[in-house]
Image: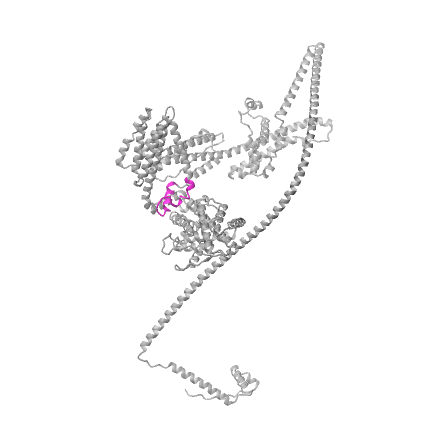
């Protein structure tokens, strides 16, 4: 490329031309002008600059062409290419190592950030606890100061009160002395007045008797004078006047007696009105107050008297009978007739009017008619009473009339008043009849419902007895034990009581319906037993055609209710059977015994059953003993017991021994020996010894020595008691009863062992698909198919709906906890429990290879069930059967036990946290080993306390904390008392549901249980438990949390297998 020639440019200096010069060139020209001293650049300078630029451009082109020129290949080209490949591979490896190191640094940084976050939360928690302890100490000092001031003030007041008391006592003594003197003077005056009054009364009586005697003598003299003076007519007139006078005096005497004893209608109405029972007042009264008012004797007597008076004033009926005929039963016997106006029915109208929701069980048409009739009856009743109180015509009288006019109008007012009174009485009686009819119709419905309940209860008792005693179609059972006989006797007594109730309620017709229902229940039971269908508890279809119609037809509403009762009575009873309970326990077992983990949960129920069984056995053996101690002993029950021993041994023995058992225990020979009255203890002893030997042969060989020793001891005791006792009959009875009872107990234990062995043989089959299918079929029979789950499983539907709203959040938190877990070989750091406290090392976490229950894989139903179980047991309110989902009724006691363990973990964690903070606030120089020793001692004491006494309260927990803190150093009594007060206040405050510390601790425990439920009980789940509990310094509780949560992990998959179709239908 040749050199370029320079180009000279002439640029005009005019203003117009300068405006057209490009800015870059103009700027360069200005720079040149400035550097050149202010004048324009010359052509030589421009040419020099252009040459310099061209030279630089030429150098750049030469460099670029040399770079692009091909270099000659050398023989070592291939080796250099290999070196370049190795170098590139080394660089790639170095880059990979750098990437891994950066990734490791990032993970370490995240772990450190998590530890810093946890430390920050710990510091916040520590700050709150420390602040609370400081506040508690300040409060204690203020209370102590206030207490000292109060004591000083009390001492001062006591001294002043003593002085005042001495002064007041002296004044009181003077007043008492003066009062005694005054009382004596008044007593003397009263005695004198009484003496004068008695004298005056005696004189008055004497004067009255004297005047009456003089009056009688005057009357006799007047009668004699008139008799002597007049003739026969005057004598008859005198007799008439005498008889009229006698009748008037008799009428007045009877009227005074009537007013005094029975009172007038006005007085009875006033007494009732004084009770305050009216429509306005009863509506403002609470139901309990109204019931107490109406149940008081005063209200009952006043209302009864008024209603009886109304009944006597009712006009005669239209069938021609007079009022005298209507009153005839009252003359013969007051209690032999039924009152027209029932007292309690009348008062019930006020209760229906004031509180219909509390009295009536529904809001149907009959209830509405009853309320309307009750309101009408109350209205007419109160109008009638008001008419009596105010007077029939009092409101219409004119007080301005003079005496002459009032006498002429009095008669018309009386006639109008009587007419108004009769009208009110007739209206009242009509309203009563209407209300009584509606009331009876309503009570008929209740009576029918009650009769149905009684009949259903009788059917349930009968079916339960038939299932327990294994009765045949003819009502007999060949293997009745003494327990079964006691059950039969109890059921017979209960059936008799129910029959009496039905007889009293519905008469003979109710008894017939009850017998028919029992017969139907028995036939259905035996039919189901023959067909091999599952034995549910059927309820008889009871219809009670009670009616009050004279035609004998059933009212329309009764037909509807009867059909409803019949349709509802066929629904199965929601109670799981014993077979379901046994299969459920076996499916939840991890191998081994049947009872397993639920023994503790069923302790209360088992204790109650044991007490009932013990009472029934004692009653049975008392009956047997009494029958043998009579003057004419009855040995039938004794023979039956020996027969039971023989049959039980015959059923348990192998085929070759059965004939031998019948030969050695001969019931015919035994009955002949007992009927002869010889009381041969030797023969009975042989039977007893043979039975015990046979039991020992049939039992396990490992128990042979133990059983032989107990059998020999029994036989020696029986022989010694028969020799020592002088009464031969009593010793015979005692020996027989004791021997038979012991033998039957041994046989029962042998039967239990055989049953357990049989069940253990069946466990592989039951734990497979057979057990799940059986429980699934039983659940379907009880609650219907999955399609109807939303209607038949309301509690389960509510539980699933609540769990669905939180399951996603819980699962995300669980995954987040897993992402920040340290590696398997990462050392667990010390966690600062409190700001001023020492570090607490976390619990040892097992290796990844340790076995455990499986974790949740994220499946929808499995995740839903596990989270739902966690919500059930984490509630602070005790779990109730009514609020438990129907699918967990078989595991209700198991869930209650886990909930108790959940709350125990919260209590123990809070106590350890509080004690740690209190010790550090008192002594900041305490060493970590000393602090850990105290906390370990407290942990052991609380675990022992809560395991042995589940109902332990705050006082026991505080005592355990004080005992553990004693090992931290000796203190004075005042400091010990101060520590006790601080611990008590802080513990009580920290265990409140709305407290911040309680929320933090309960949330940490919730996360620990969630870690095991969703992460399994292997190393991963235990790491999650440890990470959650070390936030509150409770790593020692990790094992308890894992064991408690394992119960829920076993419940979840079993419930998913059995109730999976229902869960899917509801989810």
- Quarter placement of the N terminus: bottom left
Relative to 959, is 244 on the left or the right?
A: right
Residue 105 on the magenta span: no
Q: Where is residue 719? Give x, y as percent.
A: 33, 30
Tell me if I can see residue 883 in this picture.
Answer: yes
Residue 582 on the magenta span: yes
Please state which of residues 439 and 631 is positioned toward the viewer in this rendering: 631
The mark tally for this picture is 0
Relative to 729, is 170 on the left or the right?
A: right
Residue 638: image quadrant is top left
Q: Where is residue 265? Give x, y as percent.
A: 62, 28
Q: Where is residue 548? Give x, y as percent.
A: 49, 31
Q: Residue at x 64, y 45 (%)?
A: 156
Q: Residue at x 44, y 63 (%)?
A: 109
Magenta-colored span? 577-606
Residue 663: image quadrant is top left
Q: Decide: is 772 above or below 79.
A: above
Please state which of residues 934 and 123 is positioned toward the viewer in this rendering: 934
């Amino acid at each position: 490329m040749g050199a370029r020639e320079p180009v000279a440019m002439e640029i005009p200096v005019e203003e117009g031309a300068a405006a057209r010069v490009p800015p870059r060139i103009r700027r360069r020209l200005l720079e040149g002008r400035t550097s050149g001293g202010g004048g324009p650049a010359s052509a030589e300078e421009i040419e020099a600059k252009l040459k310099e630029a061209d030279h630089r451009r030429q150098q750049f082109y030469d460099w670029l062409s040399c770079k692009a020129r091909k270099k000659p290949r050398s023989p070592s080209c291939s080796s250099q290419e290999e070196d370049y490949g190795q170098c590139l591979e080394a660089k790639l490896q170095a880059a990979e190592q750098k990437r891994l190191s950066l990734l490791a640094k990032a993970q370490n940084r995240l772990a450190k950030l998590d530890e810093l976050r946890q430390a920050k939360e710990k510091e916040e928690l520590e700050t709150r606890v420390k602040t609370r302890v400081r506040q508690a100490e300040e409060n204690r000092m203020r209370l102590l100061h206030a207490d000292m001031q109060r004591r000083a003030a009390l001492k001062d007041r006591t001294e002043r009160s003593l002085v005042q008391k001495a002064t007041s006592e002296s004044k009181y003594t003077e007043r008492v002395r003066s009062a005694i003197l005054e009382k004596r003077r008044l007593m003397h005056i009263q005695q004198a007045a009484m003496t004068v009054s008695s004298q005056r009364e005696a004189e008055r009586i004497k004067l009255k008797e004297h005047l009456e005697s003089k009056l009688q003598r005057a009357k006799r003299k007047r009668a004699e004078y008139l008799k002597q003076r007049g003739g026969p007519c005057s004598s008859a007139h005198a007799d008439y006047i005498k008889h009229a006078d006698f009748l008037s005096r008799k009428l007045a005497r009877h009227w005074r007696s009537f007013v005094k004893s029975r009172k007038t209608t006005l007085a009875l109405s006033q007494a009732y009105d004084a009770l305050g029972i009216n429509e306005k007042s009863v509506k403002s009264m609470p139901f309990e107050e109204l019931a107490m008012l109406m149940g008081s004797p005063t209200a009952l007597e006043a209302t009864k008297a008024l209603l009886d008076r109304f009944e006597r004033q009712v006009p005669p009926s239209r069938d021609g009978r007079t009022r005298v005929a209507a009153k005839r039963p009252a003359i013969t016997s007051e209690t032999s007739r039924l009152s027209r106006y029932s007292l309690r029915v009348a008062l019930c109208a006020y209760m229906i009017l004031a509180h219909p929701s509390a009295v009536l069980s529904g809001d149907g048409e009959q209830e509405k008619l009853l309320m309307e009739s009750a309101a009408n009856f109350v209205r007419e009743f109160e109008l009638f009473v008001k008419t009596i109180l105010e007077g029939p015509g009092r409101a219409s009288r004119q007080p301005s009339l003079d005496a002459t006019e009032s006498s002429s109008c009095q008669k018309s007012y009386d006639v109008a008043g009587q007419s108004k009174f009769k009208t009110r009485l007739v209206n009242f009686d009509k309203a009563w009849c209407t209300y009584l009819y509606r009331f009876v119709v309503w009570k008929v419905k209740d009576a029918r419902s009650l009769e149905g309940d009684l009949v259903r209860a009788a059917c349930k008792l009968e079916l339960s007895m038939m299932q327990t005693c294994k009765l045949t179609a003819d009502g007999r059972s060949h293997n009745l034990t003494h327990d079964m006989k006691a059950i039969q006797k109890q059921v017979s007594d209960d059936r008799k009581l129910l029959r009496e109730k039905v007889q009293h309620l519905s008469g003979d017709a109710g008894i017939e319906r009850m017998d028919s229902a029992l017969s139907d229940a028995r036939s259905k039971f035996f039919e189901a037993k023959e067909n091999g269908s599952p034995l549910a508890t059927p309820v008889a279809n009871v219809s009670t055609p009670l009616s009050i119609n004279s035609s004998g037809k059933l009212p329309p509403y009764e037909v509807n209710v009867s059909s409803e009762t019949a349709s509802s009575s066929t629904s199965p009873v929601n109670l799981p059977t014993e077979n379901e309970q046994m299969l459920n326990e076996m499916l939840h077992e991890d191998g081994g015994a049947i009872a397993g983990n639920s023994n503790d949960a069923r302790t209360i129920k088992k204790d109650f059953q044991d007490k009932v069984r013990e009472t029934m056995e004692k009653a049975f053996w008392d009956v047997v003993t009494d029958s043998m101690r009579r003057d004419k002993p009855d040995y039938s029950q004794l023979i039956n017991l020996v027969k039971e021993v023989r049959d039980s041994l015959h059923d348990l023995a192998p085929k070759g021994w059965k004939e031998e058992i019948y030969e050695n225990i001969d019931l015919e020979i035994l009955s002949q020996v007992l009927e002869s009255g010889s009381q041969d203890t030797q023969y009975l002893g042989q039977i007893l010894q043979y039975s015990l030997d046979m039991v020992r042969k049939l039992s396990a060989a490992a128990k042979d020595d133990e059983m032989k020793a107990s059998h020999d001891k029994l036989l020696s005791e029986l022989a010694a008691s028969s020799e020592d006792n002088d009464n031969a009959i009593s010793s015979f009875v005692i020996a027989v009863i004791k021997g038979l009872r012991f033998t039957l107990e041994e046989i029962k234990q042998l039967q239990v062992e055989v049953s357990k062995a049989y069940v253990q043989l069946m466990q592989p089959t039951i734990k497979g698909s057979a057990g799940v299918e059986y429980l699934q079929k039983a659940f379907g029979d009880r609650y219907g198919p999955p399609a109807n789950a939303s209607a038949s499983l309301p509690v389960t539907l509510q539980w699933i709906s609540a769990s669905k709203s939180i399951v996603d959040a819980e699962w995300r938190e669980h995954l987040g906890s897993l992402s920040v877990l340290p590696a398997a070989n990462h050392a667990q750091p010390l966690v600062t429990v409190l700001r001023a406290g020492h570090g607490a090392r976390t619990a040892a976490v097992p290796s990844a290879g340790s076995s455990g229950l499986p974790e949740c894989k994220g499946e929808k139903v499995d995740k839903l069930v596990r989270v739902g179980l966690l919500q059930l047991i984490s509630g602070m309110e005790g779990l109730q059967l009514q609020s438990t989902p129907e699918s967990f009724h078989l595991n209700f006691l198991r869930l209650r036990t886990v909930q108790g363990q959940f709350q125990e973990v919260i209590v123990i964690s809070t106590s350890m946290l509080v004690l740690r903070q209190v010790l550090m606030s008192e002594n900041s120089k305490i060493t970590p080993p000393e602090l850990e020793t105290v906390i370990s001692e407290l942990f052991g004491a609380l675990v022992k306390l809560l395991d042995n006494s589940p109902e332990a309260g705050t006082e026991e927990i505080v005592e355990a904390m004080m005992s553990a803190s004693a090992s931290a150093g000796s203190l004075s009594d005042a400091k010990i008392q101060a520590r006790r007060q601080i611990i008590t206040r802080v513990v009580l405050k920290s265990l409140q549901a709305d407290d911040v510390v309680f929320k933090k601790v309960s949330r940490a425990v919730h996360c620990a249980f969630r870690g095991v439920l969703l992460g399994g009980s292997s190393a991963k789940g235990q790491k999650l438990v440890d990470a959650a509990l070390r936030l509150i310094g409770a790593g020692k509780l990790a094992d308890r949390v894992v064991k408690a949560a394992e119960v829920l992990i076993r419940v979840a998959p079993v419930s998913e297998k059995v109730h999976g179709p229902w869960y899917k239908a509801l989810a």
